[in-house]
Image (spheres, rainbow, N blue to C red):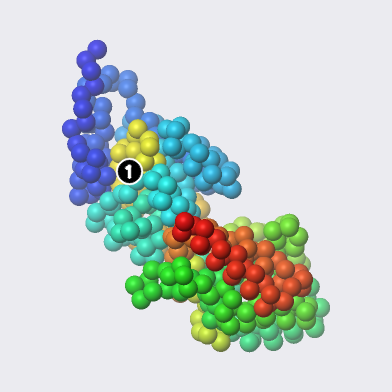
Amino acid sequence: MNPVPRLAVTRRTALVGLGGMSLAAFLAACTSGQSTSSTQKLSLWMDSAFTAAMKKTVSGFSDKFGVSLDVQPKDYGTILANFQQAAPTGSGPDLLDVNINFIGPLVDARLVDAIDFGAKLSKLDERAVTGYTVDGKQYGLPLAIEATNMWRNPAVVSEPVTTFDDLAKVGADLQAKGIKYPFLIDVNAYVWQGMARAFGGYVFAQNSDGSYNVQDVGLDNAGTIACLQFLADGVAAGWVKYAGAADNSGLDVGGAGDAWKAGQVGLHLSGPWMLDTYKKSGPFEIDAIPAGPAGPAVSWLSARGLVVNSNSKSSALGATFLTDYLAADGPMTTWAKTTSKLSAWTPVQQSAADKTTLAFAAASTNAQPIPQNAELNGFWTPMTDGLTLILQGKSSPAEVASNVAQQFRTSIASTAK
């Protein structure tokens, strides 16, 4: 058998989308001199909740290009840790399903490749592009974007609640009418952040260029304390309730659906992940998070997408699959329709006609990408634990703010070392 010739393209050419070699030409170069029975292979670790949607999205890929794409369902809660262990040894997948906040840690660990999408970059939501960019380079293809929103039960609350002052009045009125859950909020640091901004709180201060100053932490400033005090007052009055908690207390997803159907939930500050539950539980409306004394709520924009394992022997093929096949109207339309997610592909976003997708888009208007700074890793657990204490009425807002900020600053200092 003749030896397989060296690939006749450079790595950069393989990574360039429309501006470089087409996928068909790239594959022809890859298989030049090989037996006709030889098949190129790619593996993808995918959140098990979206495996079926991804298989449908790429259903024509293998037949058209002769590449075997193995979409492997994984537990999303452990997918990052497992990849970080497997990838350095060469035993991980070629492609990985990631959330936007994974990008920074993966780039810092040098486990993913930068990808050049060429002219196609202009068809991606700018906020998603920002979130997938580190030091001026884009890593991976964002597929869908989402941010937090207010779920409203129209059978209980007829009109959107536009300010937190109004929310307090509505909550008290609903409680007086015997509604068991006037206002639900997830015990989740990601969900809370948009509300905090409406009160003047923040995690990291933002620089004029949109980057974040990790030395300026606002978790114990007056705005954060005011936000926590608002929740604490509502808990004490009885109209603020919580869904889920770090200690597994609170109303779970199924319980929220049952209560919604029974007309016992008025408003729920959460996110698009509640769609399947509330679709089955009766009518619903999707509103923006109310404004506060400091102005509009500014949620963190999250984005799900795929990245390329830099240690994979098929990394160039994986990148070309993203740039020349998946980053296109057809696959992106299929993904959006199958998942009911707001697409990161602007032509699909702009052509969306269903009420739910348009409502999610409107609710996310002010959202900004989650920071990619590695220091953010120290935020999630302390803040979620602090919210649990507030929503269970076990600690004061000032005490929680002080403790969370101190833990976070200690973590930031440790990360810097």
Q: Which residue is mark 1?
A: 319
Looking at the rendered image, the quarter that the N terminus falls into is: top left
From the viewer's side, name the closer residue of 296 and 122.
Answer: 296
Residue 54 visible in the current orientation? no
User: Disc 1 on helix, strand or loop?
Assistant: helix
Q: Position of residue 31 (x, y in %)?
A: 26, 27
Q: Is residue 365 above or below residue 113?
A: below
For this orientation, the residue located farthest to the top is 1
Q: Position of residue 91 (x, y in %)?
A: 46, 32
From the viewer's side, name the closer residue of 64 and 186.
Answer: 186
Q: Position of residue 284 (x, y in %)?
A: 62, 69
For this orientation, the residue located farthest to the front is 417
The quarter of the displayed image where residue 163 is located: bottom right
Amino acid type of the residue tagged 1 in the rendering: Ala
**x 58%, y 61%: residue:** 380
**x 51%, y 72%: residue:** 217
**x 34%, y 34%: residue:** 314
Q: Is residue 298 above or below residue 135?
A: below
